Amino acid sequence: MTHDDVWRAIERFATEHGMSCSGLAKCSGLDPTTFNKSKRWSKEGQPRWPSTNSISKILSSTGAKIQDFTKFIDMPEPQRD
């Protein structure tokens, strides 16, 4: 599981629930910018991982289980032509 895998899973999870990442954050009681791409890396180039609290909140707000989220981590990247 990589940094990119987890962020991609959040994007897919939001889409699965008919929302943007911003909409998912707002629905979950988080700042709308919580999942912005600009917040995924520090100014020093270090990866910023989403907190377990943020993951817990998106699960709670959607009624999903952790398995519902983690299936998106294991999904392969769509092939582009």
Image: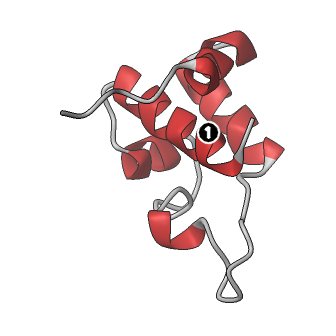
Taking 36 as reference, is 5 left or right?
A: right
Which residue appears at 73% of the width and 56% of the height? 49
Number of residues whose C-alpha sits closer than 10 Å to that of mark 1, classed few (under 14), some (14–19) or many (20 or more): some
Taking 37 as reference, is 46 left or right?
A: right
- Where in the figure is residue 66, as x and y percent of width and height? 73, 18
Of the pair 49 and 60, the residue shown nearer to us = 49
- Where in the figure is residue 59, as x and y percent of width and height? 65, 26
Which residue appears at 60% of the width and 65% of the height? 40
Of the pair 47 and 65, the residue shown nearer to us = 47
- Where in the figure is residue 33, as x and y percent of width and height? 48, 65
Which residue appears at 79% of the width and 45% of the height? 53
Residue 28 picture quarter: top right
Q: Is residue 42 above or below residue 67?
A: below
Taking 47 as reference, is 37 left or right?
A: left
Residue type at numbered disc 1? Asp
The mark total stands at 1
Task: Tell me the residue that label 1 is attached to.
Answer: 5
Judging from the image, the colouring scheme is: secondary structure
Residue 6 picture quarter: top right
Taking 52 as reference, is 11 left or right?
A: left
Q: Quadrant of the C terminus?
A: top left
Q: Is residue 49 above or below residue 70?
A: below
Which residue appears at 67% of the width and 20% of the height? 70
Q: Residue furthest right?
A: 52
Q: Residue furthest left?
A: 81
Q: Secondary structure at mark 1?
A: helix
Q: Residue furthest front?
A: 81
Is residue 17 in sight in this rendering?
no
Q: Quadrant of the N terminus?
A: top right
Is residue 65 in sight in this rendering?
yes
- Where in the figure is residue 63, as x and y percent of width and height? 60, 15
